[in-house]
């Protein structure tokens, strides 16, 4: 029989953390765009957040077992959408990532939706592996499930989003009982891949020119005065010059004069760190840590394996986003185009996070085994 | 375990921030202060304009613009009143400029005064350290010849409009200059060049502290014009203070040798930024100094049009060539009396007697052409007028050319929804009524007829590719009779240009005087200036296949065509042959204008002789369509 979720069962702590992060984002988007031609962007972000909250509550009402039952169909829809975006998608910034939703006329970044579908598909897959050890057959199957959409997303090209699929697979496989030999092989393959990306004779064959430029300028920022090396340098200058106390709201020169690249989106943490200083960073990263820990706690309390895999998939995706984005802002990773969840401006990315949290709520609401 | 991973990850990231924001904070703070790269545009100078001999007609002069650095809004706020005071711009005006540009990145300075005066430069230099938000850049400005010399053909530049920015594919930015009128606009793409940029390091308020790299500006290309400076000078001087226009063409090539329009304007006034008040004054002036009368004045051609009527008569043989009329000083057509100019002549004679075509052109007898026009009908007149270019733009390489009008039965039907009145044909046959032309059209038409029906497209760009040409072959005997008659106008007894004779030159032409109001009306209201005539003379030399054709319009001169406009044509044609004579004797150079080899005065030194002539040329009076007088 079904449990009857009530409002008291929602994770109000999680929602409070979520709301606090969103508030920081809106404040910094306002500060970064006021007085420029982008002024008013924070209002658009608030609109996205409102839609996100509604979608989150809607998704939490629908029993996640019903959603897991539809995983194969969702998977095919996701692949279909990825193919469609390659065929008829809208091109911005040199990549085909967007598709127009006919009824509302908004552009939706399809790969964000696909991330959600992969979380669901992997949760269903790993939940059905009924042993403590994950054998090679199942590992390869899981790899293929992630590999096909990953290649399609790389075609767009969108390296950042493609990368986000990897931690979902890795975390899922670990929890499903990955054997140490397989773990070793995967680690080796990963190291080889990273090495290949940084090794020019190989990277020339597998990476797009702009991706190679980002790698090169990450390794040698001084050679690249106006490109992405320059962006990373300007971001570091912004963060560093903020000091411990920060330059104050609307007062960061790197931010206000437009030296920080896409300061309202991918580099919003850079703008935040400049204006709010290390104390502001402590607050923001503290909130993210609380969010991730709260997710893990919810996973542990899930009533079944499927629920646990769902929540951990969400945690893996969000954790990876935070890690890669913030590491980029402090110049410790190349520019990948991965936004900071809930702080960066963006419609599709924001909706993805809320839908993912909606899945978590869903699992939590049904955590009491009947 | 997952919790430890999360705490560890956040911890590592925090360590990264700690390193940047606490350990290395000073280093990055000074980088933020110091390491600001900025692009400063380097304005490309516009191309010069040269005359046909390579003499400079338009070039550039250096100047300074005042910049406001907006990096620090608090500083801008603080110093704004002082700046407004120091460089004499109202504070509200400065604030408007700031709010208009608030969407541009703050590290982009704005130009608050495009032309710094000596006092401004002194002010900025003496306050270099205590007003940190003020800066100057050097720019180049257009320099035109003074006193409106060739002003209408050359045109002027001005700040680009929003439409120009949109259609330039990002090449133009607000505050840039581009051609607005005349050749400056026509050949803007050639003249404009490509701006370069300088990458500089600026400090926290935006002042330059070092230079990284410079991309040189590519100057605009210079253009050579067909204008002859010497002839232009004669044209400007000879027309003098009277309103009117001069066009001199080489009918063999279509090259424009001189083009003047008076009253003129001084384009140096717009080379920077003209005040709204001055601009409105220029545009609303009843003397229309902004109008290029040579291509924009559409006026009745008067008796010059008789050349069209005469050519139509000879070509159609309607009436036959032997046709003669008796001119008693007036004629009655369709129940209405049309007077001949001779009826009002001051000499006392009120009749031309019996005239044939040759004499009628010489004496400009209206009654003869009334009769010819009545027999030809409006369709034939309109056909020939249109073939000779009336009602069509000549296609000269200048913007805003007007087409004039060749009325026809079809035209009144379309515009006025009525039938053509036969009486209107009588007016049109002598260049009155609704027919209007520009000076350029008349020069092209008379030159083309004297060429035997070859009409070259007039143009101002020397060595222009693809010069258009229209051919309307006229029979040899017709051309001979028409050109003989135009030669007679100047060189035979009784011709309306009899006083214009030039020794050794086959100076030919046709005068015209178009009434602004009718003779009888004028007799009623008395002779006041604003109702006086438009005097025309279109002259050329030699008699066949001319080297040069000159059309001159003198407006409201109170004199008749041969008398008011004829001497201007004569001065230019004389200057042309004087210069040619010196050139062939190898003694002419562009700079030396004072050698004695020519006959008499040289081109530059000519002072317009004002030959006093009898009123010898006129046309009849039908000021309005379809309302017969009395």
Image (tube, grey):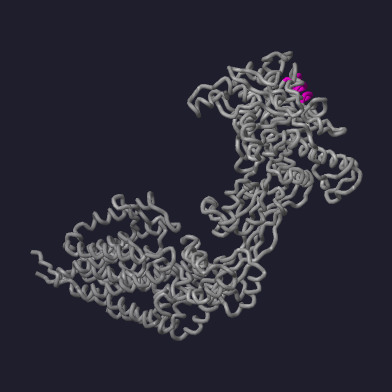
The magenta span reads: B475-485
Q: Is residue B608 left or right of residue A235?
A: right
Front residue of B204 and B301:
B301
Residue A282 lies in the magenta stretch: no
Chief secondary structure of the magenta span?
Answer: helix
Q: To which quarter of the image does residue B478 belong? A: top right
Q: Residue at x 58, y 27 (%)?
A: B407
Q: How many marks?
A: 0
Q: To which quarter of the image does residue A132 belong? A: bottom left
Front residue of B361 and B130:
B361
Q: Is residue B588 left or right of residue B349?
A: right
Q: Say whether residue B96 is visible.
A: yes
Q: Is residue B36 above or below residue B346?
A: below
Q: Is residue A182 left or right of residue A212?
A: left
Q: Residue at x 91, y 46 (%)?
A: B596
Q: Say whether residue A233 is visible.
A: no
Residue A113 percent across, percent down from the top left: 30, 59
Residue B491 percent across, percent down from the top left: 82, 28
Q: Residue at x 91, y 43 (%)?
A: B597
Q: Is residue A42 above or below residue A291?
A: above
Give the quadrant of the N terminus of chain B.
bottom left
Residue occupying the far bottom of the picture: B23
Front residue of B233 and B299:
B299
Give the quadrant of the C terminus of chain B.
top right
Residue B228 percent across, percent down from the top left: 77, 44
Residue B419 percent across, percent down from the top left: 51, 22
Q: Residue at x 60, y 80 (%)?
A: B129
């Amino acid at each position: 029989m079904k449990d009857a979720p009530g409002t008291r069962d929602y994770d109000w702590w999680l929602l409070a953390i979520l709301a606090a992060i969103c508030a920081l984002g809106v404040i910094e988007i306002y500060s970064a765009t006021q007085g420029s031609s982008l002024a008013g962007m924070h209002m658009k972000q608030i609109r996205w957040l409102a839609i996100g909250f509604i979608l989150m509550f809607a998704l939490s009402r629908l029993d996640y077992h019903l959603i897991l039952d539809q995983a194969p169909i969702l998977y095919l829809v996701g692949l279909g959408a990825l193919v469609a975006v390659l065929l008829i998608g809208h091109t911005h910034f040199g990549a085909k990532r967007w598709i127009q939703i006919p009824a509302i006329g908004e552009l939706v970044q399809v790969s964000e939706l696909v991330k959600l579908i992969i979380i669901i598909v992997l949760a269903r897959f790993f939940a059905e592996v009924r042993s403590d050890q994950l054998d090679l057959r199942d590992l390869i199957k899981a790899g293929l499930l992630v590999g096909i959409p990953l290649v399609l997303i790389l075609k767009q090209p969108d390296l950042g989003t493609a990368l986000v699929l990897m931690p979902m697979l890795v975390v899922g496989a670990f929890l499903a009982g990955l054997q140490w030999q397989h773990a070793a092989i995967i680690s080796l393959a990963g190291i080889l891949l990273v090495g290949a990306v940084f090794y020019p004779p190989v990277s020339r064959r597998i990476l797009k020119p702009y991706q190679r430029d980002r790698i090169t300028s990450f390794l040698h920022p001084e050679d690249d005065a106006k490109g992405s090396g320059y962006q990373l340098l300007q971001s570091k200058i912004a963060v560093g010059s903020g000091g411990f106390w920060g330059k104050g709201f609307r007062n960061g020169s790197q931010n206000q004069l437009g030296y920080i690249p896409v300061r309202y989106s991918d580099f919003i943490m850079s703008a935040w760190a400049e204006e709010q200083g290390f104390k502001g960073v402590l607050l923001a990263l503290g909130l993210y840590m609380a969010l991730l820990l709260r997710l893990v706690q919810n996973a542990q309390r899930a009533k079944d394996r499927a629920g646990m895999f769902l929540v951990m998939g969400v945690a893996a995706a969000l954790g990876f986003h935070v890690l890669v984005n913030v590491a980029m802002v402090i110049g410790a990773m190349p520019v990948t185009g991965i936004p900071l969840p809930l702080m960066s401006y963006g419609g599709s990315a924001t909706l993805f996070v809320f839908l993912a949290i909606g899945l978590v709520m869903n699992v939590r609401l049904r955590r009491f085994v009947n | 375990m997952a919790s430890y991973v999360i705490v560890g990850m956040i911890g590592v990231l925090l360590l990264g921030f700690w390193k940047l924001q606490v350990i290395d904070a000073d280093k990055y703070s000074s980088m933020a202060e110091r390491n600001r790269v900025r692009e400063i545009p380097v304005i490309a100078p516009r191309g010069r304009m040269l005359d046909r001999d390579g003499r400079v007609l338009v070039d550039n002069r250096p100047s300074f613009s005042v910049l406001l650095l907006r990096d620090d809004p608090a500083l801008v706020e603080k110093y704004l009143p002082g700046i407004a005071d120091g460089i004499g711009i109202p504070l509200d005006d400065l604030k408007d400029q700031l709010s208009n540009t608030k969407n541009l990145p703050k590290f982009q300075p704005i130009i608050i005064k495009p032309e710094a005066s000596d006092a401004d430069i002194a002010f900025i230099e003496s306050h270099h350290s205590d007003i940190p938000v003020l800066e100057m850049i050097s720019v180049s400005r257009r320099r035109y010849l003074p006193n409106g010399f060739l002003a209408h053909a050359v045109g002027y530049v001005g700040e680009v409009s929003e439409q120009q920015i949109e259609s330039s594919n990002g090449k133009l930015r607000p505050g840039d200059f581009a051609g607005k009128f005349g050749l400056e606009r026509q050949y803007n793409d050639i003249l404009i060049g490509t701006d370069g940029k300088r990458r500089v390091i600026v400090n926290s308020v935006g002042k330059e502290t070092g230079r990284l790299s410079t991309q040189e500006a590519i100057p605009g290309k210079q253009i050579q014009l067909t204008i002859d400076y010497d002839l232009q000078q004669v044209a400007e001087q000879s027309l003098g203070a009277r309103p009117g226009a001069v066009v001199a063409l080489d009918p063999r090539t279509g090259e424009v040798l001189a083009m003047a329009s008076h009253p003129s304007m001084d384009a140096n006034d717009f080379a920077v930024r003209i005040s709204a008040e001055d601009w409105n004054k220029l545009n609303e002036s009843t003397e229309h100094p902004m109008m290029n009368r040579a291509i924009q004045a559409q006026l009745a051609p008067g008796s010059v049009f008789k050349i069209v009527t005469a050519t139509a008569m000879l070509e159609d043989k309607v009436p036959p060539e032997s046709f003669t009329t008796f001119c008693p000083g007036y004629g009655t057509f369709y129940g209405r009396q049309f007077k001949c100019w001779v009826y009002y002549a001051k000499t006392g004679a009120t009749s031309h007697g019996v005239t044939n075509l040759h004499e009628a052109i010489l004496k400009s007898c209206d009654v003869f052409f009334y009769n010819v026009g009545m027999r030809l009908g409006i369709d034939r007149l309109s056909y020939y007028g249109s073939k000779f270019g009336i009602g069509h733009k000549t296609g000269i390489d200048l913007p805003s050319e007007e087409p004039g009008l060749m009325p026809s039965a079809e035209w009144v039907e379309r515009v006025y929804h009525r039938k053509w009145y036969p009486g209107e044909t009588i007016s049109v046959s002598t260049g009155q009524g609704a027919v209007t032309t520009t000076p350029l059209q008349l020069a092209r038409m008379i030159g083309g007829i004297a060429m035997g029906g070859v009409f070259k497209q007039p143009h101002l760009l020397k060595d222009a590719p693809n010069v258009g040409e229209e051919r309307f072959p006229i029979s040899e005997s017709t051309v001979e009779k028409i050109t003989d008659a135009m030669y007679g106008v100047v060189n035979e007894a009784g011709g309306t240009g009899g006083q214009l004779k030039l020794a050794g030159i086959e100076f030919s032409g046709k005068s015209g005087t178009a009434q602004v109001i009718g003779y009888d009306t004028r007799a009623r209201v008395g002779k006041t200036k604003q109702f006086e005539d438009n005097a025309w003379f279109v002259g050329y030399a030699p008699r066949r296949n001319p080297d040069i054709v000159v059309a001159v319009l003198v407006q409201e001169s109170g004199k008749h065509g041969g008398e008011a406009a004829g001497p201007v044509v004569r001065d230019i044609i004389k200057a042309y042959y004087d210069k040619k004579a010196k050139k062939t004797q190898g003694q002419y150079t562009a700079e030396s204008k004072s050698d004695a080899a020519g006959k008499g005065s040289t081109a530059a030194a000519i002072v317009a002789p004002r030959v006093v002539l009898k009123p010898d040329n006129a046309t009849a009076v039908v000021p309005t369509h379809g309302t017969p007088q009395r």
